[in-house]
Amino acid sequence: MLALELFRSVPRYVAARAVGDRIPGLLAGPLAPLRLVTRDEPLPPADGWARVRPRLSGICGSDLATISGQASFYFSSLVSMPFVPGHEVVGDLFDSCEDLPAGTRVVLEPVLSCAARGLALCPSCAGGWTSRCDRITVGHVAPGLQTGYCSDTGGGWGGMFVAHRSQLHAVPDAMADSTAVLVEPLACAIHAAFRGRIEPGASVLIVGAGTVGVLTLLAVRAFTSAGLVVVVAKHSRQRDLALRLGANEVVDPNEAVTVLRRATHAYRLTPDHGSAYLLGEVDTAFDCVGSTSSLDLALRTTRAGGRVVLAGMPATGADLSPVWFRELELTGAYATGTELTEAGPRSTFDLAVELAGDAPLEGMVGAEYPLSRWRKALDHAFASGRLGTVKVAFNPRED
Ligand SMILES: [Zn+2]
């Protein structure tokens, strides 16, 4: 089968990291530690596993961070190389898998937790918090926090991958592939919204209006009774979408502090060095960009005792002074698991499949590329905010 493969290349990693995201054309070019290869199809490693043929597979911000060398070395021991990326997938079961017959259209819950690895459940998995699994480096398959970072399973950026029954969710017939491929990022956004523990009427700041930002906005409106919701958007084409999805105001990053001060009557202070900040501000902020400046903005505009949620893979280097001085709760929101809803505990993925069926997700997948055009696809994904594209996806069945 054809697949895109990410391989370990320290020189390319260092070069890509040095270039950063300033010259995107270079990142998808000679510096990318990615190549199109012909690989053997992966085989199910144990009972309860089956092969899946991807229909569409999204390009995630964490994929771009990995390819461009922006991801922390922290993750290097949580992956096995070379691996086929792709964890936002809709595909068809090639083999029957327990109660799911071959041919069932499925979406992938990518975390490779105890159940998939054939292990007795760790305390996190036993509690339904599979994203917090402690055993993601042992068991039936090689180390990998998720499918798409594991050398044994294949991934969505290839012609075939293998998945465990615990990772599979059937897709309703009426749901388009272009909607189903958004279920995984939507589930992550729903998890982030729950991690925000937003009280009724609370004010919310969402920094970023890319995929994570707009889906977090959707999830906050669907699963909480938030009051004022302000979205920080860098690009003009992201503004209309954020307003359509329920933002009360959409602001430019440079105007955010000024607009928030006006909206919430906070006090604005300007330090000797660095950007202005506020005292008395939003109750909960979500960093949906994962840059140093986006996290700084979230930390500097959240009220004392408020909560800041890292909704995407974070950058390093933010100033943690407000966390200490304003007694902020800084919390992560990684992948998915179980959410404590008013109706009791629910799988985040089940909530996402339901919300995706109702939500206005049409048009969010702005471009589909065959694997052979991967450089073009990555260029598009790196520039997606400016181009007004929410999600770029691969169609591994197309030539
Ligand atoms: Zn576990």
Image (tube, rainbow, N blue to C red):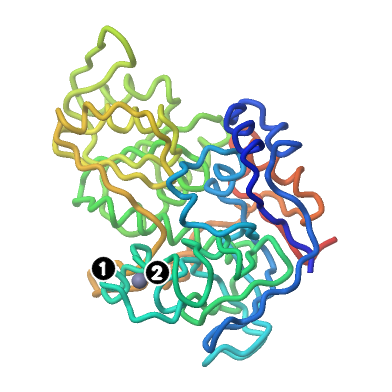
Q: Quadrant of residue 40?
A: bottom right
Q: Residue 153: x percent and y percent?
A: 60, 70
Answer with left or right where residue 301 lies relative to residue 156: left
Q: Residue 211: x percent and y percent?
A: 52, 47
Q: Residue 207: x percent and y percent?
A: 40, 36
Which numbered circle lies on residue 158? Answer: none
**Which of 120 and 126 lies nearest the eye of the viewer?**
120
Q: Earlier in the sequence, mark 2 or mark 1?
A: 1
Mark 1: give few (<14), some (14-19) or many (20+) Cα within 10 Å.
few
Element at badge 1? Answer: strand
Residue indicated by mark 1: 341
**Residue drawn at (61%, 75%), measured in percent from left and top?**
162
* Residue at the front extreme, as displayed: 10
Report how many numbered discs are placed on residues in the image: 2
Q: Is residue 195 above or below residue 236?
A: below
Q: Is residue 311 above or below residue 178?
A: above
Element at badge 2? Answer: helix
Residue indicated by mark 2: 351
Mark 2: give few (<14), some (14-19) or many (20+) Cα within 10 Å.
many
Answer with left or right where residue 337 lies relative to residue 102: left
Q: Quadrant of the N terminus?
A: bottom right
**Residue drawn at (54%, 46%), measured in percent from left and top?**
61
Q: Quadrant of the C terminus?
A: bottom right
**Residue drawn at (71%, 32%), measured in percent from left and top?**
26
Amino acid, disc 2: Leu
Answer with left or right where residue 206 lies relative to residue 374: left
Distance between mark 2 and mark 1 Cα atoms: 10 Å
Amino acid, disc 1: Thr
Q: Residue 140: x percent and y percent?
A: 50, 77
